[in-house]
Amino acid sequence: MPAGKVDCDYDRLGERTLRLPHGSIVSTDDHLGKSIYPDIVVHQREIPNNLLAIEVRKASNHQPLEHDQHKLRALTDPHLWFAYRIGVFVTLGRKQVSGAEVYTGGVIDPALSIWFAARLTDAGLGEG
């Protein structure tokens, strides 16, 4: 199995650009409203095999959370061609992670979100 790659602000899938379907209600990152740029992705570019998409934000960010949440719903949607297996949304406080959500199948996964938050707390990184 080829080694996975980790990329930041990566908007490609092979020769294709990560774009949302026309008529999507999900906001995008570019000024034309077409491309999306996940903060961090783990994938095998050559296959392609999209494993993990991560969005990270500061707790002090006053932009609505919905932008990143919508993006992760789209990035993990199995009906879209770039479907990442897992999406993670992490909110960073001043000294710890103040929020963590896990997305699978285009929706938030409550059980995995609770598990992930507990692992962060166990490691001394999350709110306890």
Image (cartoon, rainbow, N blue to C red):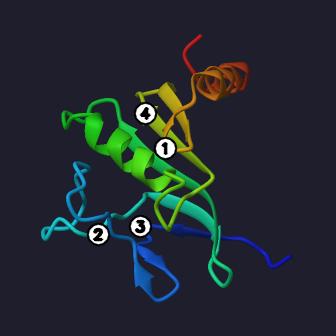
What is the C-alpha distance between the residues marked 4 and 2? 23 Å
Snapshot quadrant of residue 33: bottom left
Which of marks 2 and 3 precedes in the sequence?
A: 3
Location of the C terminus by quadrant is top right
Neighbour tally class for label 3: few under 14, some 14-19, many 20 plus, Cα within 10 Å: few
Snapshot quadrant of residue 17: bottom left
Snapshot quadrant of residue 92: top left
**Tag shown at residue 60:** none
What is the C-alpha distance between the residues marked 3 and 2? 11 Å
Say which amino acid is labelled 2.
Ser
What residue sits right under mark 4 in the picture? Answer: 91
Whether residue 1 sits left or right of residue 25 in the image: it is: right
Image marks 1 and 4: residues in contact by CB distance under 8 Å: no
What residue sits right under mark 3 in the picture? Answer: 9
What residue sits right under mark 2 in the picture? Answer: 35
Look at the numbered disc 4 and give the secondary structure of its residue.
strand
Residue 76: horizontal and vertical position, in percent? 51, 51
Neighbour tally class for label 1: few under 14, some 14-19, many 20 plus, Cα within 10 Å: many
What residue sits right under mark 1 in the picture? Answer: 106
Reply above or below: 83 against 110.
Answer: below
Image marks 3 and 1: residues in contact by CB distance under 8 Å: no
Q: Nearer the viewer, residue 57 or 49?
A: 49
Reply above or below: 48 against 84.
Answer: below
